[in-house]
Amino acid sequence: MSYDTCVIGGSGFIGRSLVPLLVATGRRVLVLGRRSASPVMPAGASYRALDITDTSEVLAALRGVRELVDLAYAFVPKTSCDDPVADVLGNLPPSVALMVAAAELDLRSFVLVSSGGTVYGEPDVLPITEQHPQRPLSPYGITKHALECYGMLYHRSLGLPVVIARPANAYGEAQDGSSGQGFIGAAVRNLLAGHRVPVYGAPGTIRDYIHVDDVATGLLALLEKGRFGEEYNLGTGRGHNNIEILSMLGQIAGHMGLPCPEVEALPARPFDVTANVLSYEKLKREADWGPSISIQSGLERVLRHAAGREH
């Protein structure tokens, strides 16, 4: 069977929103991942376990594919700080090998998913545009920045049709908060378990929280209209600190008859930037894309979904 689009890491958090969206456009989708057990895929999508470091195997799997989205990443920001060497070794070699292999294919577009929440570092101005200097403060952000550099290198030297996506802090119903990534998912998990929510530094960091379904529509827009060799932010242009998020969750929880979240105040962490809010004007201008899910409605969706799962 031939496929139109391949999503590497498509069984993960973002992929679970992106793959059904791609299928809904009529695309035949191949999902590649490390897991040997096949996850549930929507009709029109297939899953295949693959060693991405095996270039010949990658080329064989991707033969005939016209679009490629790379969502694969083996670590999250917290675990990358715990073991930065493993973060580099687990992500740079396989991703660079994938880019080299992809340059040999007849691709229409290759969307490389980076991280707008970490590659910029401490901001000079908010909201952050794509022209802002990149000064990442965490091993995760440094590795993501390095992958962007390799993508641009192979765009110029090998003609790789790369488009770089920089999503803000994605959240959504499928994020359970147990992986060390995602303040909203962790906050909801702790709220329902009756635990205090850790907040590092008062009133916590300011982040641009974007629902994962909006990230998915942004990635689709980049597949169809993104310019090769360009970077695009996927954000909302609005920021909220941790206490503001917990206050909104508390209001929603109160209407649902649930307890309000309690704060566990902890010292600020050196690898957390104080604020990260992304401008999405470039993608709006070039692809008529913008976020459609407000933070209030998104939080309500997440909390109601999680509360229903708990009972």
Image (tube, grey):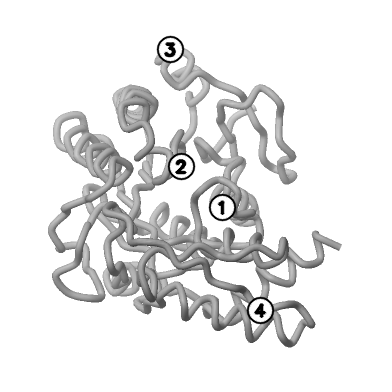
Q: Residue at x 74, y 44 (%)?
A: 43
Q: Residue at x 67, y 40 (%)?
A: 45
Pair 4/2: label in front: 4
> Alpha-carbon distance for marks 2 and 1?
10 Å
- Residue tagged 1: 18
- What's under tag 1, amino acid-wise? Leu
> Alpha-carbon distance for marks 3 and 2?
20 Å
- Residue tagged 2: 71
Element class at badge 3: helix
Q: Is residue 221 visible to us here? A: yes
Q: Is residue 130 left or right of residue 267?
A: left
Work out whether 265 lies above or below 250.
above
The disc, 2 or 1, on the residue closer to the chain's N-terminal end is: 1
- Residue tagged 3: 56
- What's under tag 2, amino acid-wise? Leu
Residue 209 placed where, x, y %? 45, 69
Quadrant into which the N terminus falls: top right
Residue 205 placed where, x, y %? 36, 68
